[in-house]
Image (cartoon, rainbow, N blue to C red):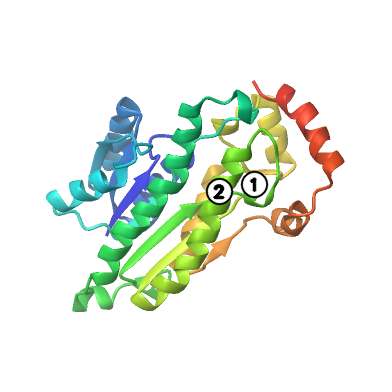
Amino acid sequence: MLSLVTGASSGIGLQYATQLARDYHTDLLLVSNQEKELQEVAAQLAQEYGVKTIAKYADLSKTDAAEELFAYCQDNNLQVDILINDAGVFFFNPYLETSMKRIELMLNLHMICVAKMCRLFGEAMAKRELTEEEKKETVLGRPRKKGYILNMSSMSAWMAMPGIQTYNATKAFIYNFSKSIWYELKPLGVNITVMAPGAVDTALFGLAPNLRKLAVALTVSIPPEKLVKKALRKMFRGKKASTPGFINWLCTPLLKHTPDWLVFLAIKYVGKYQK
């Protein structure tokens, strides 16, 4: 099988690439806008786990990025069996102080690209006919599907939080979009799963190192390797959506009813906890 992983040069995307190669022995098409780091990751994973790797530099915030990537796969006879839409950005900023360029980048990367990737690769997966040998294959004890798609949302999808207003809105789109097309793709033999984790211990959110360690110790934040292990198991088992962590799952309904005074308190203090 061939896995296409976006945002594969670092953070959660790198974990997806690593665990797919190490634990599931899939070949990899790795996509990122960090060209040097991407080449190094591809070479390392190929050497360490004996899988074929392709490093594809791409700016997925371009409006036609998904079409270009799909065309690249067609031109090179690359059949994508697993699609991991992980590429993302994060910034905390008042909306009126945020440049139009940054707003457009996040909207394109989190919504336009993800929606188009699911449309293009999802259709190709659905039209695929498994060979007799592939029909006998299993993943985690379940019959192999025509294709698998995993999209990354966030618990912030349920939050009305100033400062991350564009981020949480795009994550809400990913969550509802993914759950909706799960119903459409499942009868066609394609599994799609959306993950909505809470805080993840990466550099994405800009927290100081000591606070990152504290958050993990308090189980408020989850290490990326643990998140990815859970996410891949959910995807291969055909789960529609998941919010890892009992505390996060328990708190999700409360986020929809956060009192205004608590939101304003968070605005007051959140900035000083970032680098």
CB within 8 Å, label 2 to label 1:
yes
| Residue neighbourhood size for the residue with mark 2, other residues' Cα within 10 Å, grouped as few (<14), some (14–19), many (≥20) | many
Residue 186 in the figure: left or right of residue 66: right
**Nearer to us in this view, 227 or 87:** 87
Q: Residue 156, which numbered label?
A: 1
* Nearer-N-terminus badge (2/1): 1
Residue 203 in the figure: left or right of residue 86: right
- Residue 253 place in picture, x, y as percent: 75, 59
Q: From where the camera sits, is residue 183 visible?
A: yes
Q: Residue 42, which numbered label?
A: none
Tell me: residue 243, above or below residue 112. Answer: below
Q: Residue 171, which numbered label?
A: 2
Residue 239 in the figure: left or right of residue 168: left
Tell me: residue 135, above or below residue 79. Answer: below
Callout 2 secondary element: helix
- Residue 141 place in picture, x, y as percent: 42, 74
Residue type of the residue flagged with mark 2: Lys
